[in-house]
Image (cartoon, helix red, strand yellow):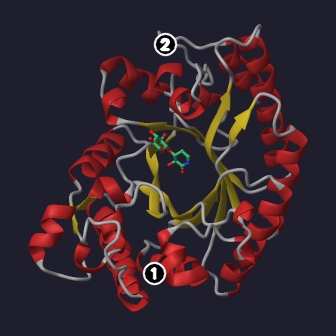
Amino acid sequence: MSLKDAYRDLFPIGAAIAPMWAYKPEFDTLITSEFSSLTAENIMKPMMIMDHDATIASGDPVNTVQNFAETDKMLSWAKERGIRMRFHVLVWHGQTPWWFFKENWSDDKDAPDASPELMLKRMEAWIRDVMTHVNTSFPGVVYCWDVVNEAIEPEHGAPGLFRTKSPWYHILGEEFVPAAFRFARRYQAPDQQLYYNDFNSFQPDKQEAIIAVLKKLQAEDLVDGMGMQGHLQMQWPAIADFEKAARAYAALGLSLQVTELDIHCPTALENGQALLADRYGELFSTLVRMKRDGIDLRSVTFWGVTDRTSWLTGFRREGSSPMLFDDTLSPKAAYNAVIDAAR
Ligand code: XIL
């Protein structure tokens, strides 16, 4: 029994991966047997695709020149294995080069920003290029797009609770969100879904702000689904609060995905792996129950494969053992708990 088999009648189970791990034979075997969806952990982010030198050399103020080498390699790898992909990510403040937002593609952080008019043109060109390339070269592989990631951040206190530090927000204001979705609608393939994706989307004030934005998008039929990232901790949030939030998004009539699941389990935590198994078990039992209740949950993706490949140790600045597989690629107690929850 593998994860993807245990969940075959429920929803695809995904993993986020980096090339340096994925293409190793032992990871290849594990990923191919356990997972039915993939996300590129970093290589399909704007910073990894946009080529600065080539863009400057082109002399074009609107269109970036893309380098799709790594993207293509992973898409064809997934295609050969019959695994479909979520595309992460088109519009985000993170891992998008500074120069993309500057006049003359300047690398200088103090250089003047591109005007809102120019930035809208650049946004359209970028979204058009990526969607057209991916859908022409690898039709049918990508099943959904993270169109906008992490636009809402209540602690910044802006009107509408947008993350004001985003260069997208800084130049275009909150209009950047519907603009991105309008372009994505224009260039997507018919069977693909468009997602808004965010972290801590179960926090009540953040959730309220996200729902307001989703409703606006829905008024123009621009969004299909809500991606709840799912970077959880051992005690927080309560799974009941996660469920409440998920049901509130689903009640809008949107599909739902858990897009970046990991549970930070400090390596030093006593009895940590047993507690982690309990927590994953509780979460997946809840997800399974929701699915059986008719919630349109379309996939659950782990943000990593083994403990060693997880980003959390760097992010949390302490050792973390958050995943279902240990460093020898053996399934942990948490793996069994997830399998059991599907029964
Ligand atoms: C993270 C990657 O895992 C890291 O390797 C990278 O250094 C930073 O980005 N939310 C997201 C993901 O949407 O893209 C982030 O991925 C994790 C948080």
Left or right: 213 in relation to 239: left
Compared with 98, 231 (above or below) is above
Q: Pointer 1: what residue? A: 183
* Total count of labels: 2
Compared with 266, 153 (above or below) is below
Characterize the local packing of mark 2: few (<14), some (14-19) or many (20 or more) Cα atoms within 10 angstroms: few
Seen from this angle, which residue lies furthest left? 57
Amino acid type of the residue tagged 2 in the rendering? Asp
Secondary structure found at label 2: loop
Compared with 145, 86 (above or below) is above
Left or right: 340 in relation to 114: right
**Percent x, y of residue 275:** 79, 17
Q: Pointer 2: what residue? A: 327
Q: Quadrant of the C terminus?
A: top right
**Among the 4 quarters of the image, the one containing residue 272:** top right
Q: Say which of 83 and 197 sits in front.
A: 197
**Percent x, y of residue 12:** 60, 42
**Among the 4 quarters of the image, the one containing residue 95:** bottom left
Residue at 28% from the left image edge and 66% from the top image edge: 108
**Among the 4 quarters of the image, the one containing residue 127:** bottom left
